Image (cartoon, coloured by chain):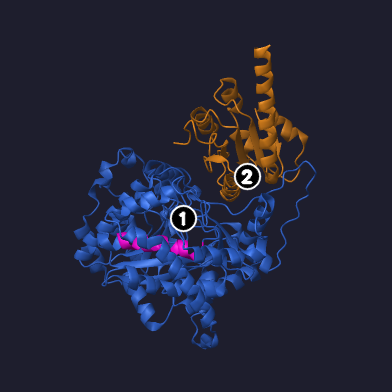
Chain colours: A blue, B orange
Amino acid sequence: MSLSAFPGFPGFPAFPAHGSAPPSDPAATPTPAESAAYITSLGKPTAAEVLDRCRARGRVAIQPRCGVGGHEEMKALLATLEAEAAPDILTLTIDSHTRLLRFEEALRTLNLRPADLNGYPMVAHGWRRGRELNELIEAPLEIRHGSPDARILFDVSVASGITSFEGGGISYNLPYSKAVPLAESLGAWQDVDRRCGELAEHGVVIDRELFGTLTAVLVPPSISLAISVLEAVLAARAGVRCISVAYPQGGHLAQDVAALRSIPVLAERYLPAGVTVHAVLHEFMGVFPRQRDNAEDLIFYGALVARLGGASKLITKTHQEAYGIPDTAANVEGLRLADRANSPLLDFITVDDDQVQREMTWILDEVADLVEPLLERADLIEAIIEAFAEGRLDIPFSASRYARSDLIPRRDPSGAIRYLSTGELPFSSAHVRRNTELLHAVDGPDPALDALMRGLTGDINHFRHVFQEEEPATPAPRSAPRPVSAARTPPTEEPI
Amino acid sequence: MRITSHQEPTARTVILGVAASDSHAVANHLIAYSLRGLGFDVVNLGTCTPVEEFAEACVRHPDAEAVVIGSLNGHIHEDLRGLDRAKQSGRITCPVIVGGNLSVGSHKGGTSHDRLYAAGVDHILSDPAELPGLLDALRAERAGAAANRTGLAAS
C-alpha cells in the first residue's frame, strides 16, 4: 500500500513543515528492495543483531520510550539519550493521530503546535527525515505506537532504516480501539508481517515486537503469553524471522520470572525452527509510586526481574511515571538506573526456583488450554476472531467491544495475579479450581460488587500500598459519589 | 435466539456504558460482570460512548430496563448533552441512571445533581452496590404501573 493510495492525503504537500529537510514526496517511498539496500549500506547493527549480541553476553538490552512532535526536538532527544545513557536500542514513539491514520491532522498539528503532539508523526515527517534520525545515532531504532493498521507507518519506517517495529493484530487493537473489528487489524498486521518476510529475502531481518502488555492493568501472564503465541505464529507463517515477546511486569517476583522463562519454552513448542525469539520485559506499566525513591526502587526491581527471567531486553520507566511524560533528564536517569541491574556484582541475587517452576507449569498449562485448540484450525485468523466473539479468548478490561472482558483478575494474598472469573476461557477444571482456591482467602466465595471494586482498586494500586503511599485525602460529603476510579485504559505505549 | 414461546421469560436487559469523553474501563467491566452474575443481559457499550450510541442501543433493545452510564473523569455534564432531546424524541424511554465521580474537584453537592436531573438523568448513584436494588425497585414500579393500567382497562 503506497501513501498515494491513501484517500485523505492530498493536502500533504501544501503544508510547509518545520525542520531542516524538506518533507518527502509521499509517492516516492522506496521499495522494500531499496530500503533493504539502504539498511545494509548503513553499516549499523540492526535491532535483531543487537538483541542477539546482548543475549550472547548475558546482558539485558536497555531501551527507553521517547517521542516528541518536532523533528529538531526529536533529534535532540535521541542525541541526548544516547550521549548520556547509551541505551542498546532507541525508540520513536509515534503520536496518536498517526496511529489512527489521521496523517493530515498530524501534519497540521506539527505545523501549528508541534508540542501538542504526543509522539513523533513519522508519516508526516517522511522517510528522508527518518533517515536523518537514524543516521544521527549509533543504536538501532524501534517504532512504538498502537495502530490497528500500521501498513503505511511500517513502509515509511523501514524506508528510514528502522529495523524494529512493535505491534500485532490483537495486541494493538483491543487495548487501543473501541470498534475496529479484529479481522481488519489482523489482516493489516499480516501485511506488515509479509513485508518483513519480503525484507528478510533481501537480507534484512526486522525485529517484530508483540505488545503482550495489552491493557496494562492486572494482565494474567497466561493471557498475555497466549495472545503473543498466536500473534507470533501468524507472524512466523507470514515470514517474520525475529520475534520479541513482550511481557508486562505484574509485580510478583516468581510469577514474573516464570512468565519470562516460559517464553523460550513456548517458542520451542509452537514456533517453527529458524525463527529467533526474544523475551522482553516492560517495567511495571500500572499505577506507579509517586515518591521518587519509591519509583526508583520499582524501576530497579523491574530490571532485576528482567535479569533473573533471562530477558533479552527491558523497556524502562522513569521516576516521573506517576506524573505524565518524563523529561529527558528523568528518562536518562531511568535508563542508567535500570542498567545497574546488569552489573556482574549482582550474581548473588537469585530466586526460589521451586516456586518459579510451579508458576511456570501453571502458566504453560493455561497457555496450552487457550492456544492449542486454535492452532489446530486450518484458518488461524478465523479461529482467533471466533474465539474472541465466544469468550474462549479474552482480555481483562478491554477497550474494544471485540473482546468480552468476562474474565476478572485479582491478586492473591502473595500479590500474584490470578483469575477471579475465567469467563468462557476453556480452562480445565483443575486450573479454575486452583485459581478459585488461591483467591478464596482474599474475598471469600462470593464478593459483593462494592467489595470487589474496592479490592480491585487496591490490586491496581498495589505498589502505592507496598510503599505505604497514602491516597490524597478526599473529603467525602454524604452526597458525594465514592470514586471508584482505577487505572485508565487504554494504556499509553508512550506515557502520553 | 433468546425467546421462544415455551422458554423462560426473556432475561432482564440493561444498557451499560461509560460517558463519551471517558476511557475508564475497569469499573465498567466490573459492573457488567456483576450484573451478568445476577442474571441480567448486559448490553455493554463500553468506554467513550456518546449519547447518540446509548439512544441507538435503546432503539435496538426496546425491552431494556435502564440505561446505566458511568463517568469518572468529571465531564459528565458535557458528555450528556443531547440526553434530554433523546428522551423527548422517544428514543430513550427507560430510566437513565448515572454513577461514578460526577464532577471535577473534591466538593460535590446538590447543584451538580440538580443539573444532571435537568439534563435528563433519572437516578444518581453514589455506590455501584446500590445498582441491583435500584433496578429491582424500578421494575416493581413499572409492574405496578402496568397492573394499574390493566386494571383500568378491565373496569
Q: Name the residue under label 1.
A: A68
Q: Is the residue A199 above or below the residue B15 in the image?
A: below
Instruction: Please tell me whether residue A233 belongs to the stretch shown in magenta.
Output: yes
Residue A388: % across, % down: 42, 51
| Mark 2 to mark 1 CA distance (whole Å) | 26 Å
Dot 2 and dot 1 within a common chain: no
**Which residue: 55% across, 46% down?**
B23
Q: Nearer the viewer, residue A381 or B49?
A: A381
Task: Using residue B118 as the reference point, say whether residue A156 is left or right of it.
Answer: left
Number of numbered discs overlaid on the protein picture: 2
Instruction: Indicate the position of residue A6 as horizontal and vertical percent values.
Output: 29, 41
**Location of the N terminus of chain B (image quadrant):** top left
Q: Let me know if residue A289 appears in the view.
A: no
Reply yes or no: does residue A377 show up in magenta: no
The range drawn in magenta is A220-234
* Residue pointed to by mark 2: B73
Q: Nearer the viewer, residue A142 or A182?
A: A182
Q: How crowded is mark 2: few (under 14 residues within 10 Å), some or many (20 or more)?
A: some
